[in-house]
Image (cartoon, rainbow, N blue to C red):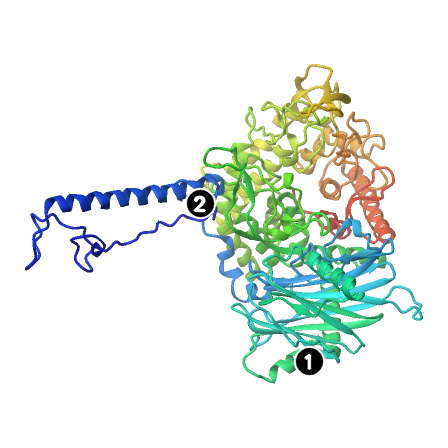
Amino acid sequence: MTGASRRSARGRIKSSSFPGGDEGSDSLPYPPSIRRGKGKELVSIGAFKTNLKILIGLIILGILVIYFVINRLVRHGLLYDEAQKPRVITPFPAPKLMNLSMFQGEHKESLYWGTYRPHVYFGVRARTPLSLVAGLMWLGVKDEMYVMRHFCENSDDLSTFGWREHNGRDFGRQELVENDMVLETSFVKSKGDGLGYGGDWAVRIDVKNKGLNDDVKRSAHLFFYLADEGGNVLNLGQDNLDFHGSSLLVSGSREDVGDWQIHLKSQNQLETHYSGFKTPHIYNLSDLVQQNLALQARKFGRLQLSDTSEDSSNIYIFQISGRLPFTIDIPFVSGIKGESSNVEKRLTSLTGSPLSDLLKKKRKEFDTKFEKCFNLSEKHDSETLGVGKTAIANMLGGIGYFYGQSKIHVPKSTQNRNNFLLYWPTELYTAVPSRPFFPRGFLWDEGFHQLLIWRWDFRITLDIVGHWLDLLNIDGWIPREQILGAEALSKVPEEFVVQYPSNGNPPTLFLVIRDLIDAIRMEKFIASERDEVLSFLERASVRLDAWFQWFNTSQKGKEIGSYFWHGRDNITTRELNPKTLSSGLDDYPRASHPSEDERHVDLRCWMYLAADCMHSITELLGKKDKLSKEDYNSTAKLLSNFNLLNQMHYDSDHGAYFDFGNHTEKVKLIWKEVIQENGQLSRQLLRKTFGKPKLKMVPHVGYVSFFPFMSRIIPPDSPILEKQLDIISNRSILWSDYGLVSLAKTSSMYMKRNTEHDAPYWRGPIWMNMNYMILSSLHHYSIVDGPYREKSRAIYTELRSNLIRNVVRNYYETGYIWEQYDQVKGTGKGTRLFTGWSALTLLIMSEDYPIF
């Protein structure tokens, strides 16, 4: 397997296999001149030479066969010698963060089971590669046709769905509304002595009418499933699921949790059916169910599973049908030893009234902790508080566990016929930006996620950041997008799967790390918590140092203190402005003609953050000058040098900070007739340059222009600060009643498509992460001494109010928090249930900002 060390197979050949060898001897036959058998005839020299030739021939043949096999494996990227393994797929040589003692024992076990499948509407798994997996499907209705609901999809058009409460550890409650039906799914864990690893857990599913008319009785068809990714055989509780209030659905045994059972209990009249499958994959499970139902419908005219199972099934799907409303409880118990009556007691505690009481208790605890962490009750009305709770609940409920290997781009060669190599097998525990559209790990999103999560549970944040830093390769690079495992791969177009080792991503993890350091300095942690954070930083520092050094060498520009994002396409004929995906700002306009002469102001500011954070770590740990030869303090001073910054990026005519590069504004997309390879004529939208590009400032005001402001490099008494405030508050440039737009309305690229198929993304719409960072600096300049203090306060107050009001309004009108918001009307755009960095609305509500 790619990424694994090649192990040398060393066999021992007995000499008895050859003429003239002694039984059990490890030596080859000796010449007869020096070896005589007692009482035996001498072996002739001629016979010996013949045998020796045969032996040498066999050895040579064996070597050739081994060489041929190994060479084939290497050429196909399936095997690498440690000494020859490409650096890009070689792990960083330092102890893993996840091996720290703080992540073992009770902490690890307490997080073992969870709703770690954000890509499905409801799913449960363990934090282990080959887990026992549970999930829910149901039959919805669209255009008067039944459709299977399983994976979260924007196209499903549910009125609303998402977590209403979730504590990230042992409890969550979710609502899903489709047409006239409401499903409420609750998950809760139970700990105690004598249980299997990770404890017991239970799922409650309430299904009810959305309307108040109980006379209209409709049926619902749910499909709850259990699958063992490790292929372990599952045992059906009974062949005929004649349900009478309680039933053993399925049982099994695993090394991690021992013997286990899962039951179904309900007080309602229900009909149950099942189907069992044997397959190593679960990403196409809904297809298997639909095929089974369709076959039954054609044969017997009924919409029910076949009540059959394949031999050695490792997956069972249970159809549960009934008239609304109805409630079902599904408890899971593990670590079962013998016919203990303790099992029945445990099942009772996780069903019926005891389960209801436990869920009420957990909901109350969530509300209490929410108030303690964010202190909003006196600042906002109940509707605003409701959105705040939704934000943190979905952020925590959107945490997932993934396992697999990333595909890393390499040029094709005789050794590797593909254009990629496989990273080493790795696990990732991470929050995700959006369950319907981005249900996987994104490096630059994660730092923003953790600004929110650490305030709720800093140990979860350390766990997540640790997983990300353990992805570091020997060069100090981390793949920016993590698509791990078959389920994750099934959701991503092939062209976006391969990751490029030359490309970075904003190192936002430094945001949360410096925030944690500031919390230590402000004594927000008790002594034991402080020690945990310091222990984490002690081990993380060497990886953070390597990560910084990768940026500081691979992304540096031609001038000292300059940097540019690699990965732009300098030969494209289709993009109006070549995208800069590595910056995270995708189609935000940069220099029209990419080159190594570019200087990107946002990356310079990210590097300032990273250098300053590393300096803080060395000071906090007392490790100055030990982590690296690099003097982080000097680097931070260089990158925060106001005069040098202005020389490289400030445009006095616009009063704004810009990128620098080979640029012309005279670029357009025009329709052209093109002869394709097959000889046919097609009409395509292609880029044409009408003027020669020159090295100069790139005159586009937008989010990138405000990175020096967000980094607070601008002195509070500088007239340049006033110019930033003027641009921010100018309705003709960035200001709207719903937040700051991403690109100035006066820009030539404002709301322009980048290709025929690429609508404007960072060219106008309002994004919450950048608004949060700009708002954070407005707050900073409103409390420090300076002539623009009051002006900063006035702009801050109005912008904050606009952002909160618009997110809350959209939530109650549409049922969702959105990826971005329209620059004209403020309506939600992009993907819905985007409770990644859009959830920063909660920190805006609580006026809790990091020191950037």
Classify mark 1: residues with Cα within 10 Å, few (<14), some (14-19) or many (20+): some
Point out residue 282 in the picture as x, y percentages from the top left corner: 64, 58
Point out residue 665 in the picture as x, y percentages from the top left corner: 74, 20
At x 73%, y 66%, the residue is: 305
CA distance for labels 1 and 2? 52 Å
Classify mark 2: residues with Cα within 10 Å, few (<14), some (14-19) or many (20+): many
User: Hey, which quadrant is residue 650 in on the image?
Assistant: top right
In the image: residue 110, left or right of residue 845 = left
User: Hey, which quadrant is residue 396 in on the image?
Assistant: bottom right
> Is residue 380 among the parts visible in the rendering?
no
Secondary structure at numbered mark 1: helix
In the image: residue 173, left or right of residue 642 = right
> Front-most of 613 and 438?
438
746 to 796, vertically: above or below: above
Instruction: Tell me whether the residue at label 1 lies in contact with that at label 2, contact meaning CB atoms closer than 8 angstroms.
Output: no
Residue farthest along the left direction in this orientation: 39
Quarter of the C terminus within the rendering: top right
Point out residue 758 in the picture as x, y percentages from the top left corner: 75, 34
Q: What residue type is labelled 2?
A: Leu
Secondary structure at numbered mark 2: loop
Point out residue 726 in the picture as x, y percentages from the top left corner: 80, 31
> Front-most of 748 and 795?
748
Q: Which amino acid does label 1 sit on?
A: Thr
Counting residues from the start of the chain, the first of labels 1 and 2 encountered is 2
Picture mark count? 2
Which-is-in-front pick, marks 1 and 2?
2
Dot label at residue 348? 1
763 to 257, vertically: above or below: above
> Front-most of 707 and 433?
433
> Front-most of 239 and 761?
239
Residue ID for mark 2 = 79
At x 7%, y 52%, the residue is: 42
